[in-house]
Amino acid sequence: MQKELSVSSPKRNCWHFLVILGVSAVVFFDGFHCRSLWTSGEDRTAQIAVEMVEGGHWVIPHLNNEVTLTKPPLLPWLIALCYKLFGTNEFSARLPSVLAATSAVLVIYFFARKFWDETSGLLSAVVLATSIEFSWHARTARIDMLFTFLVLMSLTSFYRAYICEKPSWKHFLPFYAFMALAALAKGPAGFLLPLLTVLVFLGLKKDFSGMREVFCWQGLLLFLAIALPWHMAIVFQAPRDKVTYFFLGQLSEWTGGKARRPTEPPYKYLVYLAYLAKGFFPWVFYLPASCIGAVKKWRQSRDAGVLFLLVWLGVGLVGFSLFPTRAARYILPIYPAAAMLVALVWSAARTPDAGELRRWLFRITVMVVVIWILLMLTFTAAVFVGQAGGAHIGVNGLQKLVGKRFRYIVTAPPGLRGAELVLLATGFVVLGIASIAQLKRKKVAAAFALLLLLALTQQAFVTHQVLPGIERYYNVKGFAREVNRQVRQEDDLAFIGKWHSWMRFYLGRHVERILPKDLLGYLEDNEGAYCLMASSAYDRLPEEQRLTLKTVTSCITEGKTIYLVSAKH
């Protein structure tokens, strides 16, 4: 195995650590528990954990008292532990993701500091923390942030072991342990992404003797010892149809079942580039130059570290693009590699002989600041238009870009007041111009600090202004409170149509599923019975059936009206 010498670095300064914790506090911890669980998957995970605590379903996950096997239970286990410590609430549901994100930021700081320098470590950490997609999923009760952290730990553990002077199978055991935990978090992707990255990296280095040392039977045994027991338990304890779907049904969907269209256009395979451009904003504009610089560095100095980052980034993009099920959050595990590549460019620009690189950074920063300011000004104008009466100009156009939730942002009282937005937009312009000016004066550190301040300002704006507006779009917590006020605990409650996990989480009771044809019989046979249904199901009921129903209360959530009905007596 070809050995790589680690870069010696002085003891890290305390202020680096404080900067990282300060950025994490603003980006991850600030108000992460204030909004309700949205119906984007986090309500489902949170409710599975509730039923683990209340029903003792620790091995076989349950949702609304029914067996559900779509993902392994590592995240629900952690959330359930938080419920026991801090109570059943949004804080506990999202805490594992917040801690995983903070840990990931610290891990890449120590990793980049060890193999390059302290500046690269600090810049890597803050770039990762302030990228849009990463900071968003750090504040949600979804599996993606925990999965990202475990993949990061697996790959960094491998590289640390690989560059040891005399690596043995013992050095690679953490690689297998974290890979097994990633598999317990998100299934096969937990080991496929790290394994493919390592194989491609060793293949490009032509280090075939290294493969024999990395892929050892002791590591495989540790992997099976961690990942296999739960999978064996569901085989023997879960219903057969659920087990079949977990092992075979989902695999068919991922690899070309119902998710793949018969004639998928070629550009669909490039969709993750668009996802990366959106999710890694604003740092994505520096990524092409960073990759080019990393390739040059590999050719000149054979720096195995930059090759490893390039392979990590490339395998993730190409690998996920081959699967027909695509979402922006799937490529979160490649964000640490992208962050370190960008950080290496900014760190290299601080050297005296990096004049050409600084000129490139200047041009890119001008473009980034202009785009940033235009987006902020466009949003400000759209809010003014929306609050002035919801004119179609601006509001509808942006609604197509960011979804139907947008109209709840631009009309949200009392937030997003005009004076505050004008002040914020002015601040964006001032900070952006100041950053460009500092780069022009060759003060790279000051320019980066101003860009970081822009990113933190944006995050604070989203947390305290935008998200409260979107919260009105979901409106589930208040509706559940109203339902509990109308329906006593001893009364029967059912629902018709699509199941939403927030019903069980916020209502705190079992909600029975019934068919539309059984509605009248259910309400008449059970005194004090109620039923929840969306407007689509209500409108499909026959007119004579609707006349026998009493609408107790209703709300609009996700743009749909949900009714609580009972029988007229």
Image: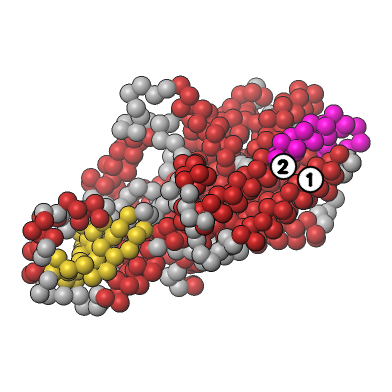
Q: Quadrant of the N terminus?
A: top right
- 163 up-or-down from 471: above or below: above
Which quadrant is the C terminus positioned in? bottom left
For this view, does 357 lie left or right of residue 313? right
* Residues packed near mark 2 inside 10 Å, few (<14), some (14 to 19) or many (20 plus): many
State the image quarter where residue 444 is shown.
top right
On whether residue 354 falls in the magenta region, the answer is yes
Label 2: which residue?
A: 369
Instruction: Point out the stretch of residues depicted in magenta.
Output: 347-370
The image quadrant that residue 482 belongs to is bottom left
Query: Which of these two is toward me, 548 or 361?
Result: 548
Q: Are marks 1 and 2 in contact (CB under 8 Å)?
A: yes
Q: Looking at the image, which is closer to me, 232 or 39?
A: 39
Q: Circle 1 sits on which residue?
A: 433
SS type, badge 2? helix
Sequence order check, earlier mark of 1 and 2 = 2
**Residue in the picture at 32% in, 54% down:** 560
Q: Amino acid at mark 1?
A: Ile
